[in-house]
Image (cartoon, rainbow, N blue to C red):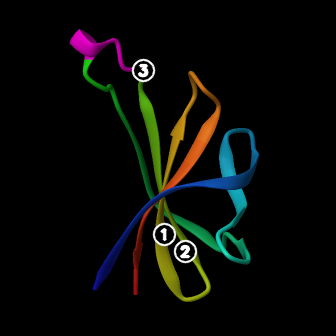
Amino acid sequence: MSKFVNKPVRVIAKNGIPEQFYYHKEYRVEGIQEQWRESGQWWLEESPIHIYRVIAAKSVFELHFFPKTNQWLLYRIED
């Protein structure tokens, strides 16, 4: 089951790869399940988004990184 979150989070990353993040508490990333980039809607001048599906605390979290604004977003949690 998936829970839509879509909230900004604080992430500590090394070389652009998330190592830990904070959402109500601290989570340490145990592994990267998948990662990819989406180009955004160029006609709206959106910048690319880096997407990471990370494993932490026996769940999968989908983190989005927006390099243009240097912001992270927790998009969803899967149990």
For the residue marked with disc 2, what is the amino acid? Answer: Ile
> Badge 2: how crowded within 10 Å, few (<14), some, or many (20+)?
many
Position of 36 relative to 69 (above/below): below
For the residue marked with disc 3, what is the amino acid? Answer: Ser
Callout 1 secondary element:
strand
Q: Which residue is mark 3?
A: 47
Which sits earlier in the primary sequence, circle 1 or circle 3?
A: 3
Q: CA distance from mark 1 to mark 2?
A: 6 Å
* Magenta region: 42-46
Q: Which residue is mark 2?
A: 55
Position of 66 relative to 28 (above/below): above
Position of 72 relative to 74 (above/below): above
Q: Position of residue 32 (x, y in %)?
A: 54, 63
Position of 39 relative to 37 (above/below): above
Q: CA distance from mark 1 to mark 3?
A: 22 Å
Q: Which residue is mark 1?
A: 61
Seen in the image, is 30 located left or right of residue 2? Answer: right
Q: Position of residue 73 (x, y in %)?
A: 53, 51
> Badge 1: how crowded within 10 Å, few (<14), some, or many (20+)?
many
Q: Position of residue 46 (x, y in %)?
A: 36, 20
Residue at 71%, 54% in the rendered image: 10
Q: Are marks 3 and 2 in contact (CB under 8 Å)?
A: no
> Badge 3: how crowded within 10 Å, few (<14), some, or many (20+)?
some
